[in-house]
Amino acid sequence: MAGVKFLLTRVDELDSSFIVRARDLGHEVDAIAVTTTRYRELSDVSTELDGRAYRTVVLTSRRAARYVPLVTTLPDAVLACVGPTTRDAVTWEGRSIVAAPANAATLSQLVSEAPLVWLAGSPHREDFITGVTARGLACDIVEVYETVPVDLRGEERDLIRQADVVLCAAPSAWSAVSEWVSPASRVVALRASSVPSEVANRQVVERWDELLQGE
């Protein structure tokens, strides 16, 4: 695989090592922030939590870390996170569970202590809540931030159209770019839930680096 044009649908320091390695191998990599985050007011989230006490606090994104101090926890409460990056964003001195690589479905099989609250984004994936519900666990969902599409400029749309490989880390990213992706492009989903299974030329990975293995 030589001379591939990769298009990342986010601008994130987590992707820096992939970008460096891909460019070192002779590929072209562009990164566009196709979505942005709107955070809820802390006071509004606190009101929704309403002082309820939880034994497990769930985070599937580091963007929710700022809201953890608002949660009332029971003794020996557990912080359950998708991936070490999310865990490291939180100041937490109690027990913690981390599912790595980032995989909410795996985390849903590790939590066991109710009551649970998930500090989620909007829209959010269903794999975590589906997993815990199937195990008979009730989980409150409090949406603390919203992911919204960016109004893309003409040159950004052109980069999407011209990409050989479009990388999407979330359903919101795919929704933001799907109109502009060429039918000939390969669409790479970071975990299966990021891109619908019916999308042509879809590939699922757990890490972007998997695309460079063997080079």
Image (cartoon, helix red, strand yellow):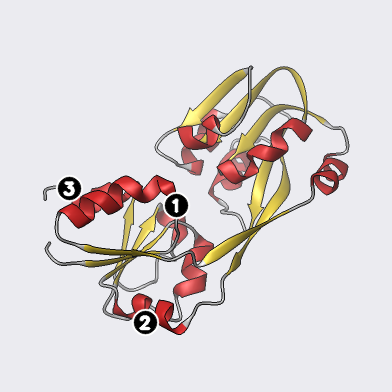
In what element is the residue under mark 2? helix
Query: Badge 1 is on which residue?
Result: 12
Tell me if residue 16 comes above or below residue 194 in the rendering. above
Amino acid type shown at disc 3: Gln
Element under disc 3: loop
Q: Residue 176 appears at what percent x and percent y?
A: 51, 72
Task: Name the residue carrying label 2.
Answer: 158
**Residue furthest to the bottom:** 154
Residue 155 location (% of width, % of height): 40, 81
Discs 1, 2 touching: Cβ within 8 Å: no
Q: Residue at x 35, y 76 (%)?
A: 159
Residue 80 rendering spot, x and y as whole percentages: 58, 30
Q: Could you tell whether 8 is left or right of 132 in the image?
A: left
Q: Where is 47 relative to 55, above or below?
A: below
Which residue position holds label 3?
A: 213
SS for callout 1:
loop
Give the Cα separation between the discs numbered 3 and 2: 28 Å
Q: Is residue 179 above or below residue 109?
A: below
Amino acid at the residue labelled 1: Asp
The disc, 1 or 2, on the residue closer to the chain's N-terminal end is: 1
Q: Quadrant of residue 203?
A: bottom left
Q: Is residue 189 visible?
A: yes
Residue at x-position 68% and y-position 39%: 66
Can you give x and y, in whole percent of width and height, for residue 202 in the image?
32, 66
The mark nearer the N terminus, 3 or 2, is 2
Q: Residue at x 33, y 56 (%)?
A: 204
Q: CA distance from mark 3 to mark 1?
A: 21 Å
Q: Looking at the image, do the residues carrying marks 3 and 2 touch, with CB atoms under 8 Å apart? A: no
Quote the CA–CA distance across marks 1 and 2.
Answer: 21 Å
Q: Residue at x 11, y 63 (%)?
A: 2
Q: What's the mark number on residue 138?
A: none
Give the amino acid type for the residue marked by disc 2 in the picture: Asp
